[in-house]
Image (spheres, grey):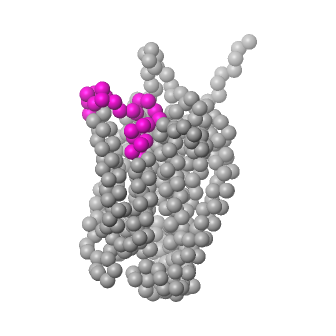
């Protein structure tokens, strides 16, 4: 009796997506509740005149009139919190497990994916609230059609916002949003892209987080000035940097571990060593900023100087990143199938599926970062 041929894996992983969407209802509900709490806090601080935003934009003192602005701020802060949670879960998932960990790697990966989707939704809501606020204000008295187009360009077109700090800050935020969508949701297309290609490109998601934090520190009026709140935001980056360093020093995959013997093997191992040293230096910088409370934030009562980063610089940096991503993708795709130890060509290994998606078990080939 002949056995039936193996069915090809579907290009779109509907099974895992359905499992994630069931949990997404819980996660997004929690995110909306946190956003509501943040909104109330911001609103009350405006009513009591204690918000640092009033030193930047005193006309926002009428919290009832500008409630959409505070909704925008609330969604921004909850998106920042969920992005922090997402990155921490992803880095934990891709680091060698510690004993007595409260979460299995499969569970961490599941929540990492779910939190990623929630983060994208919060980022979009953050931008949408700003878009609606621009429609409500209509400062230039534009017609409805021109108003919608102008607000759309300002909020959703990278580089469209052309005044003040926002011309750089909003550009950074939009790049983060538009990179987050493919880098996060491509997980469900692994069967089409190949798990190796997805895994390599997904590591660039750490850049999304860096851009999000940069956007917050540059444009968040609540942390516009030096002070305890801005210092806390910096302090929250310390565990991320430490976990990122741990992920590089003790990766889950054996072939990513760096030994002294590897250092004589050419440019590749040396560049990996350079990456580890750069992250270690970043840990020191974040620690010094957190302890000193000085990171270049504005000082109340003093005019800010010229911006050190301009739009052309951001566009140039993005071009470099996209070029590197393209080169990496071509290198991985050209490698195609991998060679087994015996010299036989094998396709990429299939991942054992569990109720939450790819199981961790003995297979460590699908870790997210």
Q: Report the number of numbered marks.
A: 0
Q: Main structural element of the magenta stretch: helix, strand or loop?
A: helix
Residue 169, relative to residue 252: is it above or below?
A: below
In the image, residue 253 lies at what x, y percent? 46, 33
Q: Of all residues shown, which one is farthest toward the top? A: 1
Classify residue 141 as left or right of residue 104: left
Residue 1, relative to residue 214: is it above or below?
A: above
Q: Is residue 358 magenta?
A: no
Question: Residue drawn 54% across and 67% down?
Answer: 75
Residue 194 visible in the current orientation? no
In the image, residue 201 lies at what x, y percent? 44, 43
Query: For this rendering, which residue is in front, 344 or 34?
Result: 34
Query: For this rendering, which residue is in front, 155 or 200?
Result: 200
Residue 299, relative to residue 353: is it above or below?
A: below
In the image, residue 140 lies at what x, y percent? 44, 85
What span is colored magenta in the figure? 244-267
């Amino acid at each position: 009796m002949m056995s039936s041929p193996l069915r090809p894996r579907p290009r779109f992983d509907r099974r895992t997506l359905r499992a994630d969407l069931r949990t997404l209802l819980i996660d997004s509900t929690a995110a909306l509740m946190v956003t509501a709490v943040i909104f109330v806090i911001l609103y009350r601080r405006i009513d009591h005149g204690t918000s640092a935003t009033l030193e930047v934009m005193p006309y926002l003192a009428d919290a009832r009139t500008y409630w959409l602005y505070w909704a925008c701020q609330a969604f921004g802060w909850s998106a920042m919190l969920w992005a922090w949670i997402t990155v921490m879960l992803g880095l934990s998932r891709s680091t060698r497990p510690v004993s007595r960990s409260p979460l299995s790697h499969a569970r961490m990966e599941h929540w990492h994916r779910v939190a990623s989707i929630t983060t994208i939704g919060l980022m979009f809501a953050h931008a949408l609230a700003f878009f609606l606020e621009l429609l409500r204000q209509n400062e230039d008295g534009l017609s409805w059609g021109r108003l919608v187009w102008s607000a759309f360009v300002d909020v959703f077109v990278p580089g469209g916002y052309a005044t003040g700090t926002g011309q750089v800050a909003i550009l950074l935020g939009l790049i983060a949003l538009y990179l987050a969508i493919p880098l996060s949701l491509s997980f469900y297309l692994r069967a089409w892209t190949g798990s190796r290609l997805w895994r390599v490109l997904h590591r660039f998601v750490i850049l999304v987080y860096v851009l999000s934090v940069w956007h917050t520190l540059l444009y968040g009026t609540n942390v516009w000035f030096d002070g305890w709140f801005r210092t806390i935001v910096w302090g929250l980056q310390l565990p991320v940097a430490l976990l990122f360093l741990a992920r590089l020093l003790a990766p889950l995959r054996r072939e990513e571990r760096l030994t002294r013997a590897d250092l004589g093997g050419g440019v590749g191992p040396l560049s990996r060593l350079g990456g580890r040293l750069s992250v270690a230096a970043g840990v020191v910088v974040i620690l010094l900023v957190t302890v000193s409370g000085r990171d270049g934030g504005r000082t109340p009562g003093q005019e800010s100087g010229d911006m050190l980063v301009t739009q052309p610089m951001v566009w140039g940096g993005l071009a470099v990143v996209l070029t590197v991503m393209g080169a990496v993708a071509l290198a991985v795709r050209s490698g195609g199938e991998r060679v087994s130890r015996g010299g036989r060509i094998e396709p990429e290994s299939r991942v054992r599926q569990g109720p939450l998606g790819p199981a961790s078990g003995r297979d460590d080939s699908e870790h997210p970062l």
